[in-house]
Image: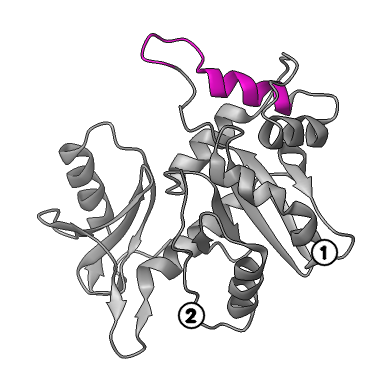
Amino acid sequence: MERAGRRRWGIPRGREDRARDALTGFAPKVQIDSVKPAPIPGYYQVIASGQMVYVSADGKYMFSGSLIDLNSRTDLSDADWAGFRKAELAKVPDAQKIVFAPANPKHTVTVFTDVTCGYCRELHKHIEELNKAGIAVKYLAWPREGVVTTAGRDTPTYTQMVSVWCAADRKASFTAAIIDGRDPKPATCPNTVKQDFDLGLKLGVSGTPAVIAEDGTLIGGYLTPAQMSHALDALAAKQPVAKSNVTNR
């Protein structure tokens, strides 16, 4: 927290509340997760309900979209999104995930997935190949139908994913459901499927699979093992990553 009287990026202390109030006045139901001075003078960068926007310190103006540093040719919005995702995912214990990993992984990705998603199926078909390439895959649940219907009942996909996450052998149940299309044995237990879904929304997930690297970069939807290895190697070498053209469904 800044000390009284100090400024950052030309914004006096206390203006954050003005920007925050302006945004909630514009969208009363918005959930604000992060507010910090933007890299441009007089603006705050706000992450709210899975969106990143820039709000003027006087609360009069807002814009969305990528903020590009023309000198470094860097997408500053992508970099800040990655940092936010990394911090939030670090709070999620592996016990909450379904993990397929080699003994000594070279790379690790977190994948928001849905057992009824075609591209998620294609990705999981290659799980052994991914593991052999040194890539650990950690799945979080993201039922694309959402958690409840408009009638207030659990969605069918949510129910399926709860059964998978509550199975005695979650990896086997997940593979049978997503590859073979078999309905998992009905099961309930204290679970984190809704928590995972809400986290995905918070991180800007809008479809599955959503593949996130260790540094928080969203590298794409569906990627082949070769594409994923290339993307992760490029990130490790701090090179620009070309996102997959095939995203999700």
Residue at x 66% of width, y 23% of height: 162
Tell me if residue 90 can be seen: no
From the viewer's perspective, is 14 left or right of 74? left
Q: Is mark 2 on a helix, strand or loop?
A: loop
Q: Where is residue 27 in the image (x, y as percent from the top left)?
A: 21, 37
Closer to the camera, 51 or 59? 51
Is residue 48 located in the magenta-colored stretch of the structure?
no
**Which residue corresponds to mark 1?**
132
Nearer to us of marks 1 and 2 is 1
In the image: residue 183, left or right of residue 68: right
Q: In which quarter of the image is residue 126?
A: bottom right
Residue at which label 2 appears: 240
Residue 134 position in % (x across, y down): 79, 67
Residue 102 seen in the figure? yes
> Which circle's residue, 1 or 2, is located before the other in the chain?
1
Give the percent coordinates (x, y) of residue 172. Answer: 82, 34
| Residue in front for this viewpoint, 176 or 156 | 176
Q: What stretch is highlighted in magenta?
A: 149-165
For the view shown, which residue lies furthest in the left direction? 60
Bin the neighbour count of mark 2 within 10 Å (Cα to Cα): few under 14, some 14-19, many 20 and up: few
Q: Which amino acid does label 2 sit on?
A: Pro
Q: Residue at x 46, y 57 (%)?
A: 246
Residue 199 drawn above or below residue 37: above
Image point (35%, 38%), residue name: 31
Rounded to the nearest angstrom, the CA distance separating label 1 from label 2 is: 25 Å
